[in-house]
Image: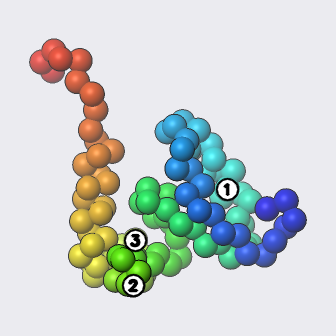
Amino acid sequence: MLKNAPVLILDEATAYADSENEVLIQQALANLCRGRTVLMIAHRLHTVIAAQRIVVLDQGRVLGIGRHEQLLESCELYQQLWQDHTRIRQWQLSSGEPA
């Protein structure tokens, strides 16, 4: 990024960030990535929702290619991963007291 490279490869760029810092990192990356080709490797699906093209891999095989909305309709693995991701994001620790 410092060399103003036209192509960036980001491998789990926010993997070890807490949720607050992850948002800040994503905002900074969005600015730095403008006008460049970016290959982003990620397991956190919310980090790739806005990508122009998402490639879904399973054990080295390509199972789907498309935008987020397209993959939700056409790729069974992506659908399952998104459902799991959504469930996990909504999960919270309980105080032990009834709500």
Q: Residue at x 57, y 67 (%)?
A: 40
Residue at figure coordinates x 49%, y 62% from the top left: 42
Q: Quadrant of residue 39?
A: bottom right
The image position of residue 36, as x and y in percent, is 73, 73
Q: Are marks 3 and 2 in contact (CB under 8 Å)?
A: no
- Inter-mark Cα distance, 2 to 1: 26 Å
Measured Cα–Cα span from mark 1 to mark 3:
19 Å
On screen, residue 97 versus residue 67, left or right, reads left
Residue type, numbered disc 3: His
Residue at image point 24% right, 65% down: 80
- Residue occupying the point 31% across, 71% down: 78
Dot 1, crowdedness within 10 Å: few (<14), some or many (≥20)?
some
N-terminal of the pair, mark 3 or mark 2, is 2
Which mark is first along the chain, 3 or 1? Answer: 1
Viewer-side label of 2, 1: 2
Q: Amino acid at mark 1?
A: Leu
Which quarter shows the N terminus? bottom right
| Earlier sequence position, callout 2 versus callout 1 | 1
Residue 38: give x, y in percent of width and height: 65, 72
| Mark number displayed over residue 29 | 1
Please name the residue that numbered disc 2 is placed on: 62
Q: Is residue 64 left or right of residue 47?
A: left
Q: Residue at the far left: name it.
A: 98
Among the 4 quarters of the image, the one containing residue 46 = bottom left
User: Relative to 70, does residue 2 appear above or below in the rendering?
Assistant: above
- Which residue is the site of mark 3? 68
Image height of 14 relative to 45, above or below = above
Image height of 56 relative to 34, above or below: below
Tag 2: residue type? Val
Could you classify mark 3 by the number of other residues whose Cα lies within 10 Å: few (under 14), some (14-19), or many (20 or more)?
Answer: many
The answer to whether 88 appears left or right of 39 in the picture is left
